[in-house]
Image: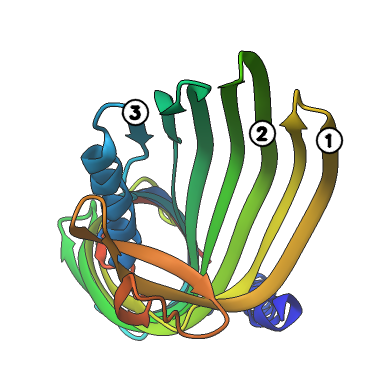
Amino acid sequence: MIHDKVLPIRKAFGWILCIFLIVLSADALPLSFKITGGIGWLDGGDLNKNIQGWKRYFSDRNISPYTFSFDVEEIHRSWEGGIEITYSISSRWRIGFGLDVLQGNTKGTMSSSVELEEDYFRSADDFGTIFLIENRDQSPEYRLRAIPVILTFYHAIPFSNKGNVFLGMGGGYYFGRLDYQENYQYDSDYRDDNILSGSIFRYIDQYSSSGDYTEESRTGALGLHGLAGLEWKVSERFYLVFEVIGRWVDFSDWAGDKTDSYSWDQTWGFWGTDRDLGFEEESTGGRLWMVDYQDELTGKSYPRFVFSEEEPRLASYQKVSPAKINWNGLSFRIGIKIGL
């Protein structure tokens, strides 16, 4: 599956390289080569709704004796770069073929804990105290990437002899990828000190688990873009470029694989006489779904991603639909243009 998704990207790079080599061997063709890079803002769609949902859920659950903490920001800032070969049809009209690399990511921490102590009394000869401590620490990271192969039509407006103001619009095919990675640690310590006929019997159940969970999802979509910019002439064939780009791309049908690798250690029984430990790794394919999670404790619903082979059908999941992530946004780029 991974090979099938990567192959079109390799082909696109191959075509760009071939065209560039042909251009370098030509002497009189009205061609130019542009390299740009910059920063942008993106909406993100369901991806950021999912992060918002987790943030609200942890805030609503942060009530004594529970402690919930969430520190993961939404993905709105993106980094990008691109290369383009442009053919000048006339002094004012051009057509460009390019390849961009876009990326946005966020990471942080989320944790929850509870510490409880409860006395019980069954009779004068049977009573005791239960202790419970639970801690969960997670380090989630989301990385959203897109590689568009795009075609752009330009209209240039010269000013004096210093360069051009230009407008452009076009479209292309976007190869999208979303990676989610989480390192987690869970510890539970349960103890029951039971006084029975004047003697203490201590039952212990201690469990610890740590692991790595990953999801890799891919898809593709057609997208549109528009741009405006300035080319400032430095020499006869060399320009500085400043441009603003708006994109409209909606991704759906995200599919891929998930893997959960973890080790665990459990001690239980009276006075903790039994123990077992091990390592597990689980992998499966699936799709990325968007659900409204209905939580019984808070009485509220929260948007949330679910990675599953089939459409999730739990009673707590409402409004289930394929996840939709967009790259709708605005970016600012600077670069150089070289006439060939």
The residue at the point 27 percent across, 40 percent down is 61
Q: Secondary structure at mark 3?
A: strand
Farthest residue toward the top? 198
> Which of 153/194 is in front?
194
Q: Secondary structure at mark 1?
A: strand
Q: Secondary structure at mark 2?
A: strand
Position in image of residue 112 (x %, y %): 42, 33
Query: Which badge, 2 or 1, comes first in the chain's sequence?
Result: 2
Query: Which badge, 3 or 1, comes first in the chain's sequence?
Result: 3
Disc 1: CA contacts within 10 A as few (<14), some (14-19) or many (>=20): few
Q: State the residue position of label 3.
A: 67
Disc 2: CA contacts within 10 A as few (<14), some (14-19) or many (>=20): some
Q: State the residue position of label 2.
A: 205
Quadrant position of residue 305: bottom left
Query: Which badge, 3 or 2, comes first in the chain's sequence?
Result: 3
Q: State the residue position of label 1.
A: 275
Q: Tell me how far mark 3 sits from mark 1, CA to CA.
A: 29 Å
Position in image of residue 207 (x %, y %): 67, 36
Residue 285 in view in this figure? yes
Residue 25 in view in this figure? no
Q: As drawn, is 189 to the left or to the right of 144?
A: right
The residue at the point 68 percent across, 34 percent down is 208
User: Which circle, 3 or 1, is nearer the viewer?
Assistant: 1
Q: Tell me how far mark 3 sits from mark 2, CA to CA.
A: 22 Å
